[in-house]
Image: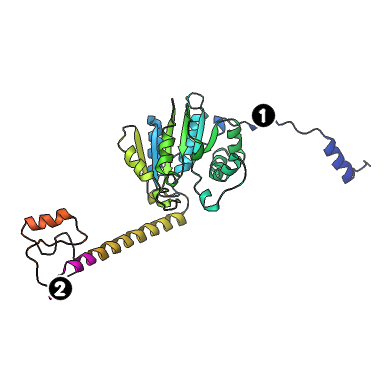
Amino acid sequence: MAKRNTLQEVAKSVSDSPPAKTTSRALKIDHGNLKQIKPITLAQNEVFKAYKRGDYFITLTGSAGTGKSFIATYLALDEVLDRSTPYEQLVIVRSAVQGRDIGFTPGTVEEKAAMYETPYMQIASDLFGRSDAYHRLVEQKHIQFMVTSFLRGTTFNRAIILVDEAQNMNFGELSTIITRVGHESKIIFCGDIRQDDLTYKRKDVSGFQDFLAIASKMKSHTNINFTTRDIVRSSLVKEFIEAHERHESAEASTRARNHAKRVLAETREDPDDKEDTASPRRWPGLPETVCLLQESAGNAGKVPWAVETDD
């Protein structure tokens, strides 16, 4: 009868065995490892078309949960890993805005920035089907992550720059980023102006709307806006954002009606007062041009036509 090895002998034989060889080729990530992604909404399809056209200044705006960052990261890595393109690196840029609320965090620049890299670790894991994908791409210098504090003097050549959460940047940050773009590069901004994390201080406000207004005057600019119809994260997210938009719309309508009623109340004449015919009537809250138009039409002292009433 064959002798049966004890657990101690088995454990010793395993520990004495030489470690399995892991080649660098097995760890390396290349273009063939990237999953093929297809657009599933109208806005996503527009992004793919813009990339195919070769657009190099793209802004993706609109609702959360629509896949803006995911699609932008996928398309960028698809080109960076393709040796037939000039692009060598995906540069992800974010503002460390949340750090202003929790104070100064200890550690090196890399350690402080690590908390903002989590979303891209998850995206890379989904795109390559392995949890270490992001770190491998960083090691291979296919991805570089930066915060806006360290961009001065930098030029990005042969790179695709992804500026994420752009609504959390002031105009100075956004201006600095776009002036870093060098030769054979393209840049993509992703942001939703309704998710502004900046504190509302005079010197610390989002500059994304002003940036978009300037960009709209540039021929090279392509903007693709995502709506609630493009939400893919979950049905709950879609339902909540739609409800939020209805709530905001109702609030805005209420504020407009209340303002109109206040203006109307201020224009009604007190019966105990005598009308001053020597000076034209003015209505608080209305532009001077409206008042002058009323007077030139012989309607001085009457309720302005621009104010709706409930009477």
* SS under mark 1: helix
In front: 106, or 194?
Answer: 106
| Residue for badge 2 | 270
**Which residue appears at 18% of the width and 63% of the height?**
308
Amino acid, disc 2 = Asp
Say few, some or many: other residues with alpha carbon within 10 Å of mark 1 (under 14 / 14 to 19 / 20 or more). few
Q: Quadrant of the C terminus?
A: bottom left
Residue carrying label 1: 24
Q: Is residue 262 magenta?
A: yes
Label 2: how many residues lie within 10 Å, few (<14), some (14-19) or many (20+)? Answer: few
Lateral position of residue 132 relative to residue 101, left or right? right
At x 50%, y 33%, the residue is: 90
Q: Nearer the viewer, residue 180 or 19?
A: 180
* Span of residues in magenta: 261-274
Task: Work out whether 118 lies above or below 275.
Answer: above
At 44% from the left edge and 27% from the top edge, which residue is drawn?
182
